[in-house]
Image (spheres, coloured by chain):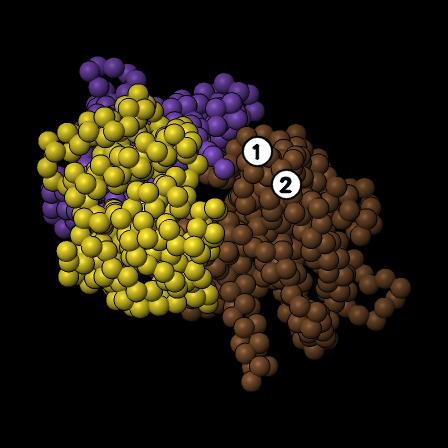
């Protein structure tokens, strides 16, 4: 397997504050990787840095193309979908319009229509609410909408920022099942940032642990899950 | 977190200004005060007049700043409150022979009531809708003042001439200089009052509403009360400025208080830095002097020159004078370290 | 008059949808465009030729203004942007006054001014204005509702960050919005000029009513803007005619007061979609 995304010496800044201190990691094509860490460790910042949404230095390569210096929208057009923290719903538009927006860069009209139907299969609740203003959806429904919207891009790589946030445990299981399915069947590489370490480690095959802007551990997900320190700090047993 | 927000999200309607950043340090304040005290002793009467106007508009901009920078409400109707204050002072002085100094608190109270009442319907409106409502108030005011019914008091289109007060206790200073110092004292009083207001419980309530109305309500802030209160306080202070303006200019007429005045005050706030009280005086200087400078550069194109100068200012310092102050402070900090 | 306001209100709503701000300089941009078309006609260009050239000029002019003046302010606070609009207003007004001076000028109408279908109420010009407004409205509705670029423009205006995350170049969407709004404004200007005559201050009153109409109808609804425009025209004339003591002077405040009353009852405007807010 070749590395699809290669991150070297990534440093990111919010104003004067440095949030990432030289991150190195790689994602293999087709993998499902999770990035774990406590609040403020730099997980969200890492995702934002990949999409050039924060000031950062270092080299990020996606399928051989270098990402630094590209605008966010151009990075997305390479096939990187980003489900942001807080979901980023287009609140004034309808659910269906939100899905159409996810596919706005695609040219195959028939494919888009089919994909919208596919999303409704994955998330039936969205179908019930397709004409509703998206801002009126509950938090969980908006999270599903955000994931569905990202999938509409037909991404090669999907970045998810705490998809479990605000969702009921049962729905989280469903969502993660769907993510696993998408990863296996559609060969979408996924990088998921999570607080819910247990679930994330069950789902993922690779894992990184990040602490105060540095990667402190990496390896196979099941190995990480069995690591003493990780179990104490993140899994709580 | 503030730094994070700067980068991550689009700028909100009014940027969150931390409480402490709304004022100046003691040292700087004293220097400013010293300058304001001493300079008039060495300049001509016309310049003293301009300095008085500088203070008066400064107060009016400050009032808008409390409303917008403090509670996040937007008003294009400040000229109406200013007009009411000016007319209150003028009518009381000329028709009822009230002492000029006494007219100011009355103007303030009347405008407070007026603003508080206007704040009631404004409660249901926000953003552009509120802008339109206040705009309507500003356009209506000159027309109302011209109405025949009130002509007995207001002097109709002609307006009223106001007598200039002499310095009291036989002080050996000119009328202009007396008015200047009189205005300065009131300005300082209002400034101190405003700073304390924003630091108080009410001030925190204003800012909570500005930053997130729903969350503020959820924390138990009486949103309706504080929003109308902000309107009232802002209108009251504007009214006092209006009264001072009437005394200084010695003349009130409907067409001095058009929407142009309201727009000027708004520009003054932006140039000074929204939510930064000391910036009000900088903004006031901008709206008093820059149109004159523009006129001086080119008579025919004065509007264009003014526009270009305004663009220059907002390009260089989109956050107004506050930005200059912050950068200055950082430089001084660095200098001290070395 | 209603048709004029409707036309202007439509332009206002357009730019509001595209950039999420009210552009106070829009009337002046329309005025400048109208002067350009007038100048072209003075040079012997036929009406429709001048019309098309002006449209194109306005479109690119709008884009240029956005790129040069407002793109650098994209990260600045909204109130700073409003100050920018005021500055732009002052500049355009003053420059137009210098080039074409402040005397009023006759402006031709392509529709003629005979009574429309023998009716005493409206002239052919007014009928033409209404026709053009309706046409524009339908066109815009389809553009925003059913085209990809229309959807992208709405997205860019409402949540710019998410719009970038689905691959929309928000910066150019805003520029495009400016261009379209300027072009629509120029149509409004060219339709209005035969009625109010051409001069640098011609848009002052019209723009205020246009804003009022847009707000009344609901800033999110182009149809609402048009209906709002007609309503404002009716309000204004009724107030002027039937309320005693209201001369021409007080017509504007009264019309505005009525609108505010409507807004207090229905804050999102008559046809606007209320926007649900969460913490």
Identify the residue at horizontal 11%, vertical 43% (top origin). Answer: C49
Identify the residue at horizontal 16%, vertical 61% (top origin). Answer: A65
Instruction: Determine whether, in the image, residue A27 is placed left or right of residue C91.
Output: left
Instruction: Determine whether, in the image, residue A214 is placed left or right of residue B245.
Output: left
Identify the residue at horizontal 30%, vertical 42% (top origin). Answer: A203
Name the tint of chain B in the rendering: brown
For label 2, the residue is B231
Instruction: Determine whether, in the image, residue C122 is placed left or right of residue C87.
Output: left
For label 1, the residue is B122
Res A107 quadrant in image: top left
Identify the residue at horizontal 19%, vertical 15% (top origin). Answer: C117
| Residue in front for this viewpoint, B320 or B183 | B320
User: Tags 1 and 2 in contact by the CB under 8 Å rule?
Assistant: yes
Q: Please indicate, yes or no, whether residue B108 appears anywhere in the rendered image.
A: yes
Q: Residue C138's mark?
A: none
Name the tint of chain C in the rendering: purple
Percent across and percent down for residue C158 are: 35, 40
What secondary structure is found at the residue carrying circle 1? helix
Mark pair 1, 2: CA separation: 9 Å
| Residue in front for this viewpoint, B89 or A181 | A181
Label 1 or label 2, whichever comes before in sequence order: 1
- Which chain did the image draw in yellow? A
Identify the chain of the residue marked 2, using the numbered disc in the image: B
Identify the chain of the residue marked 1, using the numbered disc in the image: B
Percent across and percent down for residue B4 are: 45, 57
């Amino acid at each position: 397997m070749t590395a699809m995304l290669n991150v070297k010496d990534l440093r990111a800044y919010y104003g004067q504050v440095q949030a990432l201190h030289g991150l190195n990691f790689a994602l293999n094509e087709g993998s499902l990787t999770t990035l774990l860490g406590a609040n403020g460790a730099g997980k969200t910042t890492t995702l934002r840095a990949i999409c050039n949404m924060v000031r950062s230095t270092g080299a990020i390569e996606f399928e051989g193309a270098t990402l630094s210096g590209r605008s966010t929208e151009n990075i997305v057009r390479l096939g990187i979908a980003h489900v942001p923290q807080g979901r980023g719903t287009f609140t004034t538009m309808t659910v269906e319009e939100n899905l159409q927006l996810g596919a706005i860069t695609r040219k195959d009209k028939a494919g888009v229509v089919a994909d919208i139907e596919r999303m409704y299969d994955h998330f039936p609740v969205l179908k019930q609410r397709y004409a509703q203003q998206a801002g009126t959806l509950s938090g969980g429904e908006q999270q599903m909408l955000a994931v569905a919207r990202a999938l509409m891009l037909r991404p090669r790589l999907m970045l998810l920022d705490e998809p479990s946030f605000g969702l009921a445990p049962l729905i989280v299981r469903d969502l993660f099942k769907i993510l696993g399915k998408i990863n296996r069947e559609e060969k979408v590489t996924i990088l998921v940032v999570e607080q819910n370490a247990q679930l994330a480690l069950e789902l993922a095959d690779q894992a990184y642990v990040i602490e105060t802007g540095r990667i402190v551990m990496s390896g196979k997900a099941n190995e990480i899950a069995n690591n003493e320190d990780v179990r104490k700090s993140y899994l709580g047993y | 977190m503030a730094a994070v927000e700067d980068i991550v999200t689009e700028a909100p309607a009014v940027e969150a200004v931390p409480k402490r950043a709304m004022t100046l340090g003691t040292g700087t304040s004293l220097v400013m005060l010293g300058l304001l005290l001493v300079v008039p002793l060495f300049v001509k009467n016309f310049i003293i007049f301009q300095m008085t106007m500088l203070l008066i508009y400064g107060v009016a901009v400050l009032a808008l700043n409390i409303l917008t920078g403090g509670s996040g409400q937007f008003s294009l109707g400040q000229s109406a409150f200013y007009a009411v204050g000016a007319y209150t002072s003028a009518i009381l002085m000329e028709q009822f022979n009230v002492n000029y100094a006494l007219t100011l608190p009355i103007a303030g109270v009347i405008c407070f009531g007026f603003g508080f009442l206007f704040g009631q319907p404004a409660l249901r409106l926000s953003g552009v809708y509120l802008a339109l409502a206040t705009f309507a108030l500003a356009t209506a005011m000159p027309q109302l003042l011209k109405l025949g019914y009130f002509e007995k008091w207001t002097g109709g289109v002609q307006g009223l001439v106001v007598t200039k007060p002499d310095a009291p206790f036989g002080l050996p200073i000119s009328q202009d200089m007396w008015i200047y110092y009189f205005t300065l004292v009131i300005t300082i009083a209002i400034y101190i009052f405003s700073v304390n207001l924003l630091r108080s419980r009410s001030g925190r309530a204003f800012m909570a509403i500005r930053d997130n109305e729903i969350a503020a309500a959820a924390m138990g802030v009486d949103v309706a009360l504080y929003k109308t209160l902000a309107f009232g306080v802002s209108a009251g202070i504007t009214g006092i400025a209006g009264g001072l303006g009437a005394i200084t200019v010695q003349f009130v007429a409907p067409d001095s208080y058009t929407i142009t005045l309201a727009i000027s005050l708004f520009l003054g706030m932006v140039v000074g830095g929204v939510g930064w009280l000391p910036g009000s005086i900088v903004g006031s200087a901008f709206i008093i002097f820059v149109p004159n400078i523009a006129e001086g550069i080119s008579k025919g194109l004065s509007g264009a020159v003014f526009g270009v100068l305004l663009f220059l200012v907002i390009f260089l310092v989109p956050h107004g004078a506050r930005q200059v102050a912050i950068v200055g402070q950082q430089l001084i900090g660095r200098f001290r370290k070395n | 008059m209603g048709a004029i306001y409707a036309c202007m209100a439509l332009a206002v709503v357009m730019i509001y949808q595209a950039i999420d701000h009210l552009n106070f300089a829009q009337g002046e941009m329309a005025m400048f465009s109208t002067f350009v078309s007038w100048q072209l006609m003075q040079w012997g260009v036929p009406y429709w030729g001048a019309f098309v050239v002006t449209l194109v000029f306005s479109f690119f002019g709008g884009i240029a203004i956005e790129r040069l003046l407002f793109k650098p302010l994209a990260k600045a606070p909204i109130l700073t942007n409003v100050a920018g609009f005021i500055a732009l207003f002052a500049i355009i007004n003053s420059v137009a006054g210098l080039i074409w001076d402040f005397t009023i000028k006759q402006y031709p109408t392509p529709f003629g001014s005979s009574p429309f279908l023998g009716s005493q109420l409206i002239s052919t010009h007014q009928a033409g204005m209404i026709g053009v407004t309706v046409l524009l409205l339908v066109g815009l509705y389809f553009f925003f509702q059913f085209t990809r670029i229309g959807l992208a423009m709405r997205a860019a205006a409402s949540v710019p960050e998410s719009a970038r995350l689905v691959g929309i170049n928000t910066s150019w969407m805003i520029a495009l919005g400016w261009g379209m709004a300027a072009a629509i404004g120029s149509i409004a200007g060219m339709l209005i000029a035969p009625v109010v005559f051409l001069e640098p201050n011609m848009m002052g009153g019209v723009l205020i009513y246009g804003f009022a109409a847009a707000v009344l109808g609901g800033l999110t609804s182009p149809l609402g803007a048009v209906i709002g425009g007609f309503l404002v025209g009716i309000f204004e004339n009724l107030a002027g005619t039937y309320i005693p003591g209201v001369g021409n002077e007080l017509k504007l405040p009264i019309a505005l007061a009525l609108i505010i009353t409507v807004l207090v009852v229905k804050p999102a405007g008559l046809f606007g979609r209320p926007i649900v807010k969460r913490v």
